[in-house]
Image: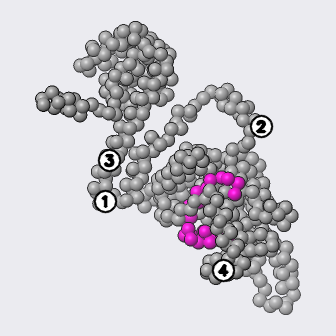
Amino acid sequence: MTAVADQFERAESINPLANPEAEVRFLSDLIADNRLIDPAADRLRPVDFSVPMHGAVFGVMLQQAAARTNVDAVTIAPFVTEFEDWPKLSRTLSAADLNAGSTKQTKAYLEQIVELSQRRRMVLGLNEVIRSAKSPDISPDELVVQADEAVAEMADQTAGDEQASAGEYAQRVIDSFGKPIVGVRSGINSIDKVVGILRPSWIIVAGGRPGMGKTAMVSSYAIGAALLGHSTLFFSLEMSADQITRRMLSDLCHSRDFSVPYEQIRDGTVKGRNLEAVIAAKNRLDQLPIEICDRGGLTLAMLGRRVRRHKRRLSAQGKRLELVIIDYLQLMQPSRSSMSPYESATEISKGLKALAKAENLTVFALAQLNRDVEKRPDKRPAQGDLRDSGQIEQDADVLLFLYREEYYLNRKKPADEFGPKFEDWRNDMEAVRGKIEFLVPKHRHGPDGQALGFFFGETVCIRGSDFYSAGEEQDYG
């Protein structure tokens, strides 16, 4: 019984998330071939070792390799004498040349040390979540963010290729010639014309005054992008998912020859042929890679967590999240309640840009414009009209502004429908009826520009300039 008890005690003392022997063998291989130290430094840190002395030895190796001096047990010794077990490790490292393994085996040790370190940090992080969960001062949302951060490093295996020579990047550019361009487009020709293909890591900010059709535009863009196979995550911070979905159904029902008014779908009064069209639109939505999140009060941390979770889910299915839409930017919550609107908008703008780059996707955010637009004779938005922060303007790769002359002319309708001014007003209205301007005052990766499209208020959707001239299959764009 004593022998069995001793075996259980020894088994319980083994840390399944540490392999000190692999660490020793790895250090020995680096001593045997100093050329392996620099590549190892790209993946490994001293804190990744489970035994503090091993981490300290690796740290000394990095310093000496950076100074271009030979690294061996003798040169390391003066810096690790405080460790009682150093003499034993020194003897092993001194015989490194005799015990060196293959490069393949060294890489296997490296991979295991990195993975075990990640797992240990995950355990520490989740233990911290458990402790936080016992505190009534920590909100459930904060707990979820903590838990996500604890597992994010294990879930993200894309790190490690953040730096290369300019020549290597140039070769990648040349290798990409003739291959399909990676990026998002909507099939709405007017928008695609002025903003181009939206590439991963870009943030596009679309602004407009109330009534310009911002949500209609971004909803139509989401549908068009999804129809082309681009997986899209739509954050609706102003409207509920129910409202956005009703709009999308009306949008999908809209063609040159037939449409279902949004009002009917909104109020649930759809009948007959219109109901058949809505059911068909619903079946189309079933096939589209769009998901909607209408959670209010999102902070950057919460939004990032949801994006990463959805991205991991798609990756498990062999798919890729390409487009994140936010309606709209100023409704996101700052990390601290004491922040001013300017500080909040600045933080969120920088955070969204960082998210687009870190997750290698496109962020399409709507933004409100300030009231100064209304004071000008020409009410077309300009680059400085974004509300709350100039940082939005700086961070955006593309600025897209919406303008509908019809909206402003309608407010100037003469009271006397038989007076001399009414006919002029009616002619002006006919010239701009249903038209929307897409203005791009800033494009970091291409020329500025503008284009004309169509806005359909009855079905709250946007179409391109070729809507009435393209083939039947182009009805959506």
- Mark 2–mark 3 Cα distance, whole angstroms, equals 50 Å
Horizontal and vertical percent position of residue 99: 39, 11
Farthest-out residue, left: 2
The residue carrying mark 4 is 270
Residue 246 is inside the magenta segment: yes
Mark sitting earlier along the chain (4/2): 2
- Give neighbour class at mark 3: few <14, some 14-19, many 20+ (Cα, 10 Å): some
- Mark 4–mark 2 Cα distance, whole angstroms, equals 48 Å
Q: Which residues are magenta?
A: 227-250
Mark sitting earlier along the chain (1/3): 3
2 or 3: mark nearer the eye: 2
- Mark 3–mark 4 Cα distance, whole angstroms, equals 52 Å
Q: Are marks 1 and 4 in contact (CB under 8 Å)?
A: no
Mark sitting earlier along the chain (2/3): 3
Q: Is the C terminus in the top left, top right, bottom left or bottom right quadrant?
A: bottom right
Q: What residue appears at the point 85 percent right and 73 percent down from the top-left corner?
A: 431
Report the side of 38 relative to 377 (left or right).
left
- Give neighbour class at mark 2: few <14, some 14-19, many 20+ (Cα, 10 Å): few
Q: Secondary structure at mark 1?
A: loop
The residue carrying mark 2 is 178
Mark sitting earlier along the chain (1/4): 1
Q: What residue appears at the point 64 percent right and 68 percent down from the top-left corner?
A: 282
- Mark 1–mark 3 Cα distance, whole angstroms, equals 14 Å
Q: Are marks 1 and 2 in contact (CB under 8 Å)?
A: no
Horizontal and vertical percent position of residue 454: 78, 67
Q: Are marks 4 and 2 in contact (CB under 8 Å)?
A: no
**In front here: 75 or 180?**
180
The residue carrying mark 3 is 128
- Mark 1–mark 4 Cα distance, whole angstroms, equals 48 Å
Q: Amino acid at mark 1?
A: Asp
